[in-house]
Image (cartoon, rainbow, N blue to C red):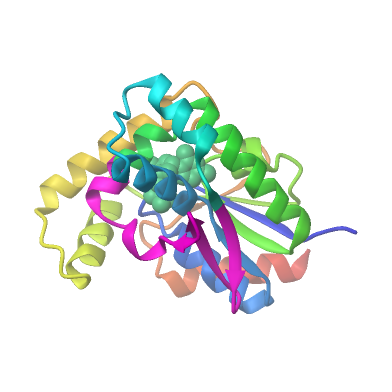
C-alpha cells in the first residue's frame, strides 16, 4: 500500500511543528514529532546522570533504553519505561542535551528505525532535521521550512514566555545559533535541505499563510 508520508525539515523555531500539526489535522493523518524522540532520549540520559560527552555511557544507555512511540487518541506519546515523558522534555536543558545526544550514530540508528516503522504503518506528517534526506529519502512530499535566526529566536522567546519561562532574548538567540551549528555540522545525517524539497522561508509569513501554501500545493498534486 502507498502511504502518505510528508517530510518537513528545518532548523528550530522555523514553524515546522505548527505547520506539521495543521497539515496532519487537515488531512486527518498522524503527526510524528521526531525531535521529541531525541528529547526523550536526552531526558533519559539526564535522569540517569549520564555524561553526554561520554560515547560509552551513551551507547550503554541506548542498548538498554525502553522507549516506545505510540498514539493515544491520535496524539503521539513517547513512553520511557512505560511513562509518557512528553510533558518533561521542552526545557532549555533538554533542548541542549537533545542536540548533543542526536549527534551519536547509535542514537540516530535507534530512532530512525522507530520513525521508519511509524511511516510504514500510518499515513503521517513527520517533522525533523533529516526526514527528507535520510529517514524517508523516497517520501513523495518534502518541505524545508526556514526563517531568519533573529525571527526564529523571537518566536522561541515568545513561546517560552507563554510557558512562564523567563529568558533573555539574547540568550535564546545565542543558544539557538549554537544548536543550529551543532545540528547542521554533525557528520551523520546533518540538517540539510533535500535536493527535491520545496523551500519555504517563513520569516515574513504568518502561520496561516504557510499552512495555506502547503495545503493548496498538496491538493494540486
Ligand atoms: O525539533 P526539536 O527542537 O524538538 O529537536 C530537538 C533536537 O533533536 C534538535 O536539536 C536536533 C535533534 N533532531 C535531529 O537531530 N533529527 C531530527 N529528525 C529531529 C531532531
Say which residue appears at 67% left-offset and 62% top-offset.
124
Q: Is residue 34 magenta?
A: no
- Asked which quadrant contains residue 183, the reply is top left
Q: Residue at x 57, y 42 (%)?
A: 111
Is residue 144 positioned above or below 28 on the image? above
Q: Is residue 78 magenta?
A: yes
Instruction: Examine the image and state in which quarter residue 219 appears.
Output: bottom right
Q: Position of residue 117 (x, y in %)?
A: 72, 50
What are the residue bounds of the magenta stretch?
Answer: 68-96
Quadrant for the C terminus in the image: bottom right
> Which residue is nearer to you in this view: 36 or 144?
36
Counting from the top left corner in percent of width and height, residue 80 is at 47, 54
Seen from the viewer's position, the closer of residues 149 and 169 is 169
Residue at position x 15%, y 63% from top?
Answer: 165
Q: Nearer the viewer, residue 138 or 42?
A: 42
Q: Quadrant of ligand 1?
A: top left
- Quarter of the picture holding the N terminus: bottom right
Residue 11 appears in the rendering: no
Percent across and percent down for residue 32 are 58, 59
Residue 134 in picture, x, y percent from top left:
64, 35
Residue plotted at (73% across, 48% down)? 139
Q: How many marks?
A: 0
Residue 88 falls left or right of residue 127: left
In the rendered image, the vertical position of residue 50 relative to residue 76, given as above or below = above
Q: Residue furthest right?
A: 1
Specify whether residue 164 is in view.
yes
Q: 22 left or right of 98? A: right
| For residue 40, above or below residue 72 | above
Amino acid at each position: 500500500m502507498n502511504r502518505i508520508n510528508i517530510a518537513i525539515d528545518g532548523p528550530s523555531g522555523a514553524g515546522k511543528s505548527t505547520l506539521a500539526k495543521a497539515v496532519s489535522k487537515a488531512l486527518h493523518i498522524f503527526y510524528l514529532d521526531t525531535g521529541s524522540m531525541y528529547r526523550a532520549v536526552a531526558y533519559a540520559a539526564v535522569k540517569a546522570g549520564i555524561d553526554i560527552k561520554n560515547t560509552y555511557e551513551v551507547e550503554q544507555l541506548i542498548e538498554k533504553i525502553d522507549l516506545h512511540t505510540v498514539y493515544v487518541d491520535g496524539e503521539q506519546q513517547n513512553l520511557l519505561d512505560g511513562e509518557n515523558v512528553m510533558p518533561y522534555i521542552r526545557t532549555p536543558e533538554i533542548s541542549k542535551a537533545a542536540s548533543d545526544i542526536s549527534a551519536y550514530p547509535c542514537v540516530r540508528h535507534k530512532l530512525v528505525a522507530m520513525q521508519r516503522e511509524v511511516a510504514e504503518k500510518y499515513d503521517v506528517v513527520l517533522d525533523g532535521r533529516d526526514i527528507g534526506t535520510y529517514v524517508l529519502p523516497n517520501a513523495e512530499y518534502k518541505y524545508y521550512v526556514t526563517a531568519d535566526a533573529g525571527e526564529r529566536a523571537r518566536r522561541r522567546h515568545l513561546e517560552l514566555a507563554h510557558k512562564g519561562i523567563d529568558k533573555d532574548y539574547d540568550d535564546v538567540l545565542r543558544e539557538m545559533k549554537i544548536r543550529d551549528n551543532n545540528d547542521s555540522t554533525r557528520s551523520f545525517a546533518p540538517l540539510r535541505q533535500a535536493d527535491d524539497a520545496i523551500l519555504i522561508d517563513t520569516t515574513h509569513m504568518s502561520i496561516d499563510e504557510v499552512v495555506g501554501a502547503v495545503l493548496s500545493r498538496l491538493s494540486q498534486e
